[in-house]
């Protein structure tokens, strides 16, 4: 009884605070809806504005909630408010339960309408055709490197990068049962099989490994056949009613995948931005050095350099480059203009806010 008496004032205070939070959330939603009306046919989703809001919230945060927790909460608030203007349609590599699906939820919140696509190509085509607003696609993994198909599609797509998502990857061995000895086949995306290569060699050396279009597709197969196990996420285990035969089987514990968000609009300055571009080097001695020299000359930091064969041109390569700063920043703009004179080919994929926690 004494404990209940001690708890009651706190419960009463929480009830009062909850009522205030609800009132304030609806006030925020009213302002968001008015902004949507004032925009008219303009872009509903403004990545740079969302990034600024989340950055400000983290600066104001005094705990005990972590910065990650408050970012997640306010992302969902913004997602619901945005849906009052127009629910966004987001394509991702499906089916449900893939890491791309989870990255899309992390970036756009649960109020967005998520559209599962069978391939990355289908996601690009759907947004390019105006049948969805944005897509989320994996672009590189900290263990296995670049996602080649995404890079190839970036060369020709008219879509612009407007955001990025950094997502920690934890793989689990999933099956309809808990008996590892029943497993005859492991089905997963080729990247996941590579990321768990050493664990599979040690624990399932004789088991067949079958690459499939996505980890969630492997989970579907495992849900239909007890001799098949999948390598997939906790969300896939829950979605397809599978057990975790083994957890966190990735070979490197800090395994992380980076995703790009692409749409049809340019993104403004957020204050902490990154620019992605593709450049071709002329077939002359020192061409790569000349290609990168403008970044050094104008104080632009390069964070990524990835070469890939140029399709249709034997032994010629294009370079995927990430640099710090927005293409509208004076030093970045000057460097890009200088690069244009040196490159055989130059395409700005887009400038966008750097991914938060």
Image (cartoon, rainbow, N blue to C red):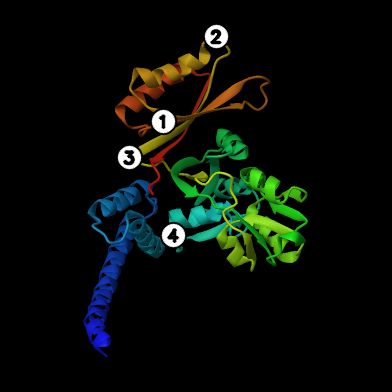
In primary-sequence order, the first of circles 3 and 4 is 4
Q: Distance between the residues labelled 3 and 1?
A: 12 Å
Quarter-of-image position of residue 296: top left
Badge 1: residue crowd in 10 Å (few <14, some 14–19, many ≥20):
many
- The quarter of the picture where residue 115 lies is bottom right
Residue 356, which numbered label?
none
Q: Which residue is disc 3 drawn over?
A: 272
Q: Residue at x 47, y 18 (%)?
A: 291
Q: Which of 243 and 262 is in front in this view?
A: 243
Residue 345: x, y in percent?
Answer: 53, 23
Say left or right for 66 vs 141: left
**Image position, residue 5 (x, y; %):** 23, 87
At numbered mark 3, what does the secondary structure look like: helix, strand or loop?
A: loop
Q: Do the residues labelled 3 and 2 touch (CB within 8 Å)?
A: no
First in residue order: circle 4 vs circle 1: 4
Q: How far apart are marks 1 and 2 (CA)?
A: 24 Å
Is residue 67 placed above or below 313 in the rendered structure?
Answer: below
- What residue would you read off at disc 1? 323
Q: Any mark on residue 109, and which?
A: 4
Residue beneath disc 2: 285
Helix, strand, or loop for circle 1? strand
Of the numbered discs 1 and 2, the one sitting upstream in the chain is: 2
Tags 2 and 4 touching, CB below 8 Å: no
Spatial separation of the CA atoms under disc 2 and disc 4: 49 Å
The image quadrant where one finds the N terminus is: bottom left
300 w.r.t. 164: above or below: above
């Amino acid at each position: 009884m004494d404990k209940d008496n001690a708890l009651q004032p706190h419960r009463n205070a929480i009830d009062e605070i909850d009522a205030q939070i609800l009132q304030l959330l609806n006030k925020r939603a009213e302002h968001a809806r008015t902004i949507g009306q004032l925009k008219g046919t303009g872009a509903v989703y403004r990545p740079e504005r969302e990034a600024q809001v989340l950055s400000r919230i983290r600066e104001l945060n005094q705990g005990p909630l972590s910065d990650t927790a408050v970012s997640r909460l306010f992302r969902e608030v913004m997602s619901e408010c945005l849906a009052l203007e127009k629910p966004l349609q987001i394509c991702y590599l499906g089916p449900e339960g893939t890491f791309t699906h989870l990255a899309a939820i992390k970036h756009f919140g649960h109020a967005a309408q998520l559209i599962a696509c069978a391939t990355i190509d289908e996601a690009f085509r759907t947004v390019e055709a105006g049948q969805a607003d944005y897509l989320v696609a994996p672009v590189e993994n900290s263990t296995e490197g670049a996602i080649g198909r995404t890079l190839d599609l970036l060369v020709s797509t008219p879509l612009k990068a407007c955001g990025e998502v950094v997502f920690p990857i934890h793989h689990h061995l999933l099956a309809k049962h808990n008996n590892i000895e029943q497993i005859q086949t492991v089905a997963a995306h080729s990247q996941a099989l590579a990321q768990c290569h050493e664990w599979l060699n040690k624990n399932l050396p004789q088991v067949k490994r079958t690459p499939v279009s996505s980890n969630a597709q492997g989970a579907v197969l495992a849900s239909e056949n007890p001799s098949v196990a999948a390598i997939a996420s906790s969300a896939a285990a829950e979605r397809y009613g599978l057990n975790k035969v083994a957890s966190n089987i990735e070979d490197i514990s800090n395994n992380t995948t980076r995703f790009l968000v692409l749409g049809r609009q340019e993104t403004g300055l957020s204050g902490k931005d990154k620019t992605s571009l593709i450049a071709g080097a002329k077939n002359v001695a020192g061409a790569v050095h000349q290609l990168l020299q403008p970044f050094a000359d104008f104080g632009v930091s390069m964070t990524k350099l990835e070469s890939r064969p140029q399709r249709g041109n034997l032994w010629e390569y294009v370079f995927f480059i990430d640099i710090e700063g927005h293409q509208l920043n004076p030093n970045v703009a000057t460097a890009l203009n200088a690069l244009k004179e040196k490159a055989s080919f130059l395409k700005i994929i887009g400038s966008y806010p750097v991914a938060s926690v």
